[in-house]
Image (cartoon, rainbow, N blue to C red):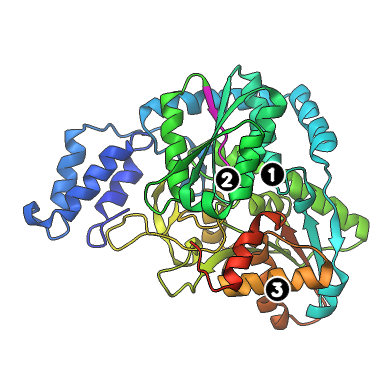
């Protein structure tokens, strides 16, 4: 969020670590737009007065652990800092112990069903002319990778003595996973979900309720994942001492992106071991990216293997060159969203831009800060796939392999049609199938009838 002419808001954001209250930031943005009373065309003077009025103190001790390069941080009100500090301390003291790790590992094996298989997709391989392997996160209990993270955070919440967990959800998979973990561990659960997503993911909304969760439908804005996340954070602030916020992706203020990455890294570790069992080394790892938890989970084991190409696939919606997409790393720029500095889709005023995707799980205007860092240092490459390309890949995978992938995962599968024709020789490509497509059948049927979602 910054002025194109003077970059003043960006400068302020860089200077005031952990002190930016969202209402105050909104006030500054509003001041900038009120050009009639600003002496500078961009409103820079008025913005400066706004921040002077609130008398922020520059934090000279920036917590380097909170950042991936220049991305990350804790851009939250002081009321939230108590909970973040409590969470970071508990994570280091509880979640890093051998006892906690053993209990979580037991649950992942005997409750979730890990390790998930790495499947050699022979018919897809023949179709594309390269060796295609699918990491089958769709076979986990609850049907996606989300349970890896939700179960770990819920177990930590229980150990911390929390009585309730809060969660946001887009496609519904994180909501289902959080409700499942809460039921298993005897915790109350509130799930915040945009009304648009409730309508297109009715099955998952009902599953959450069946599991005992309270599903809160959000009617503000575009009624999708961004609004659900904002509502969940606001609710957390109101119940900061008794509730635990289970964030669903590798986003938000520190330490959430690192916690989620750690809990999802089981995907990458297993994949590396399973590839060794096949006696092959991957050339490409491909995963869809919204917030980016499934992608960072599988990427994490290969970050030091610089000969392995890491490809994140974003939702290009109706086209990345139209206003109707969620291709954040392709079209975004530096900004602040949900307590983190990352790449954000913004309008010309620096306000969060509306997004579109047929995928309820990928229509998010930000991305995890570690992905922004990997993009910045060119360790990972990010591409967009349109709604049309995604649905064609879903159909192709269903017909050739008998596997119906989630619409989110189908974005990663769709990138094979772009990647494979450019490759020489026979390459080994691993695609993370982050979830199954049962939840998406109504969306696919509507799409076939010409309905546009998002």
Q: Secondary structure at mark 3?
A: helix
Q: Residue 278 in the image: x percent, y percent?
A: 92, 60
Front one among 371 and 386: 386
Q: Residue 11 in the image: x percent, y percent?
A: 30, 49
Q: Secondary structure at mark 1?
A: helix
Asked if residue 294 lies left or right of residue 78, the reply is right
Disc on res. 211 = none
Residue 416 in which image quadrant: bottom right
Disc on res. 250 = 2
CA–CA distance in space, label 1 to label 2:
9 Å
Q: Secondary structure at mark 2?
A: loop
Front one among 86 and 391: 391
Q: Are marks 3 and 2 in contact (CB under 8 Å)?
A: no
Q: Are marks 1 and 2 in contact (CB under 8 Å)?
A: yes
Residue 154 in which image quadrant: top right
The reply to whether residue 339 is in sight is: no
How many numbered tags mark residues here? 3
Disc on res. 416 = 3
Disc on res. 264 = 1
Which residue occupies 86% across, 60% down?
119
In the picture as drawn, the residue positioned furthest to the front comes out as 449
Against 55, residue 363 (above or below) is: below
Which is nearer the N-term, disc 1 or disc 3?
1
Against 403, residue 251 (above or below) is: above
Q: Residue 412 in the image: x percent, y percent?
A: 66, 65
Q: Residues within 10 Å of mark 1 (few under 14, many from 20)?
A: many
Report if residue 248 lies within the magenta region.
yes
Report if residue 132 lies within the magenta region.
no
Which residue occupies 57% across, 65% down?
382
CA–CA distance in space, label 1 to label 3:
23 Å
Range of the magenta residues? 243-249
């Amino acid at each position: 969020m910054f002025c194109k002419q003077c970059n003043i808001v960006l400068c302020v954001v860089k200077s005031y670590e952990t002190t930016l209250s969202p209402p105050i930031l909104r006030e500054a943005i509003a001041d900038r737009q009120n050009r009639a009373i600003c002496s500078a065309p961009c409103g820079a003077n008025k913005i400066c007065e706004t921040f002077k009025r609130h008398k922020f103190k520059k934090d000279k001790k920036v917590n380097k652990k909170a950042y991936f390069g220049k991305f990350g941080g804790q851009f939250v009100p002081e009321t939230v800092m108590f909970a973040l500090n409590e969470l970071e301390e508990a994570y280091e003291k509880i979640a890093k112990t051998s006892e906690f790790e053993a209990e979580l590992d037991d649950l992942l094996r005997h409750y979730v069903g890990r390790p998930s298989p790495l499947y050699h997709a022979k018919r897809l391989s023949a179709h594309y002319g390269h060796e295609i392997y699918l990491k089958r996160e769709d076979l986990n209990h609850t049907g996606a990778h989300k349970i890896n993270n939700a179960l770990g955070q819920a177990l930590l919440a229980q150990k911390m003595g929390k009585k309730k967990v809060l969660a946001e959800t887009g496609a519904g998979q994180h909501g289902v996973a959080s409700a499942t973990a809460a039921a298993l561990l005897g915790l109350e659960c509130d799930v915040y979900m945009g009304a648009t997503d409730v309508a297109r993911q009715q099955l998952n909304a009902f599953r959450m309720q069946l599991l005992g969760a309270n599903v809160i439908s959000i009617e503000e804005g575009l009624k999708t994942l961004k609004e659900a996340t904002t509502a969940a954070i606001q609710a957390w602030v109101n119940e900061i001492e008794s509730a635990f916020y289970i964030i669903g992706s590798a986003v938000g203020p520190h330490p959430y992106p690192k916690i989620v990455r750690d809990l999802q890294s089981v995907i990458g570790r297993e994949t590396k071991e399973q590839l060794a069992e096949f006696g092959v080394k991957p050339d490409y790892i491909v995963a869809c990216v919204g917030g980016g938890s499934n992608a960072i989970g599988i990427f994490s084991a290969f970050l030091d293997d610089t000969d392995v190409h890491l490809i994140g696939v974003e939702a290009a919606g109706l086209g990345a060159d139209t206003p109707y997409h969620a291709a954040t790393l392709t079209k975004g720029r530096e900004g602040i969203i949900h307590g983190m500095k990352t790449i954000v889709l913004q309008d010309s005023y620096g306000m969060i831009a509306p997004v579109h995707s047929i995928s309820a799980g990928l229509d998010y205007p930000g991305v995890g800060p570690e992905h922004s860092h990997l993009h910045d240092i060119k360790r990972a490459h990010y591409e967009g796939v349109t709604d049309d390309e995604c649905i064609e890949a879903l159909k192709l995978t269903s017909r050739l392999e008998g596997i119906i992938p989630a619409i989110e995962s189908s974005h990663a599968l769709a990138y094979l049609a772009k990647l494979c024709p450019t490759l020489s020789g026979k390459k080994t490509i691993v695609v993370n199938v982050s979830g199954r497509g049962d939840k998406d059948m109504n969306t696919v049927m509507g799409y076939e009838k010409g309905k546009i979602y998002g």
